Image: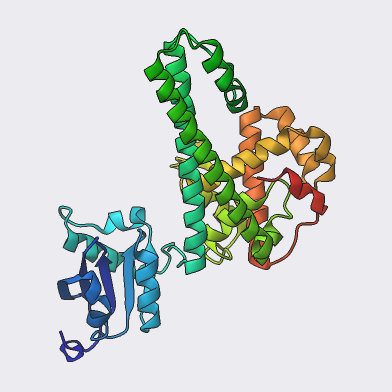
Amino acid sequence: MAKSDFDELMSIGIDIGKDTFHIVGFDPTGQRVLRKPIKRLALVATFEKLPRCIVGMEACLSAHFVSRTLREMGFEPRIIPAIYVKPFNKGQKNDYNDAEAIAEAALRPNLQTVSEKSQDQLDLQALHRVRSRLVSRRTATINQIRAFLIEQGITVRKGLRALKNSFETILEERKDEISPRMRAILIGLYGDWMWMDDRIVKVSAEIEEISRTEENCVNVMTVPGIGPMISTAMVAAIGEGEAFDRGRDFAAWVGLVPRQYSTGGRTVLGRISKRGSRYLRMLFVQAAKIIMMRPHRWPDFSFGEWLARASERMHRNKAAVALANKLARMAWSILRHKTAFDAPRDEVAIGV
């Protein structure tokens, strides 16, 4: 397809697939003038022949790579959350209809788009995802060990450390009750557990090293309750926070605001929306709960008086979410404006 086939393109929508992309383009009058599939490897060759314009794509695994490639070629890529594309989808679901909906959504001036991630951000995000998977699999392995022991009539008190400290003793003292095959199975699972422990420690150490050398992470860690995990996860997810106009927008994106169902001038607020990043939301709530476990430290914080009053009138979990919202807003402000929190540096020691 030659560039001379078009006078001008207003927008292009790409439905990104594993091997094949489907593209649909509109001219300034809104007429569809481009509709074709292309192979992934033909992306650059195809777009070199097209006029420079807005290119929309849904947020997915390849979106940031495709966005960077097209931006280097002079296009204006826009990564759109799938939930914002759905209202523009007409007819039944297929690749071309999806691409057409993306092309239309990309033209909306007030549509919230996803910030393009750099390679460093993707690398850091990958470290967090690997660590999260390892922690999840470790928990599953420990639960399986407990389940097999219960089948043998052996129970162990709660806690990872309690099982680790008593595992070898149980195998030795209960060797007459546990069959040789079951003993081999349990030893194998324990070996898996120890291997995952070692991997988690190594990945966590790498994340902590990045948090000490990355300026934005260092600034964010001055907020009480925020340590290497949250600071690096924030930088990996939102960069310098330029996608948000204010802290409350970031807190809403994380999902730390009430779900709203309002009509006719009547405002109805429910539980938290749980939209956006589930991982970041979990980290912020964990940080808030750690701070709430140490009320003797509250007077040292600028929000200490507010937290004391909130803990008196709210349920503990509700107060923790409210505090997590406040931490998220402060963290965004510091990240965006490249400043430091007005708290002593030793408060970082209680961070997540």
Q: Position of residue 342 (x, y in %)?
A: 80, 56
Q: Position of residue 7 (x, y in %)?
A: 21, 89
Q: Is residue 148 left or right of residue 135?
A: left
The residue under the point 77% across, 45% down is 303
Count the labels in the image.
Answer: 0
Of residue 205 and residue 250, the one placed in the foreground of this image is 205
Q: Does the rendering let one see residue 76? A: no
**274, above or below 165, in the image:** below
Task: Say how the picture is coloured.
Answer: rainbow
**Image quadrant where one finds the C terminus:** top right
Of residue 295 and residue 233, the one placed in the foreground of this image is 233
Q: Position of residue 256 (x, y in %)?
A: 55, 44
**314, above or below 131, in the image:** above
Q: Quadrant of residue 24?
A: bottom left
**28, above or below 170, in the image:** below
Q: Is residue 253 left or right of residue 333?
A: left
Of residue 348 and residue 150, the one placed in the foreground of this image is 150
The residue under the point 48% across, 20% down is 146
**177, above or below 101, in the image:** above
The residue under the point 54% across, 48% down is 280
Q: Position of residue 159 (x, y in %)?
A: 59, 24
**Image quadrant where one finds the N terminus:** bottom left
The residue under the point 27% across, 73% down is 12
Q: Does the rendering let one see residue 35? A: yes
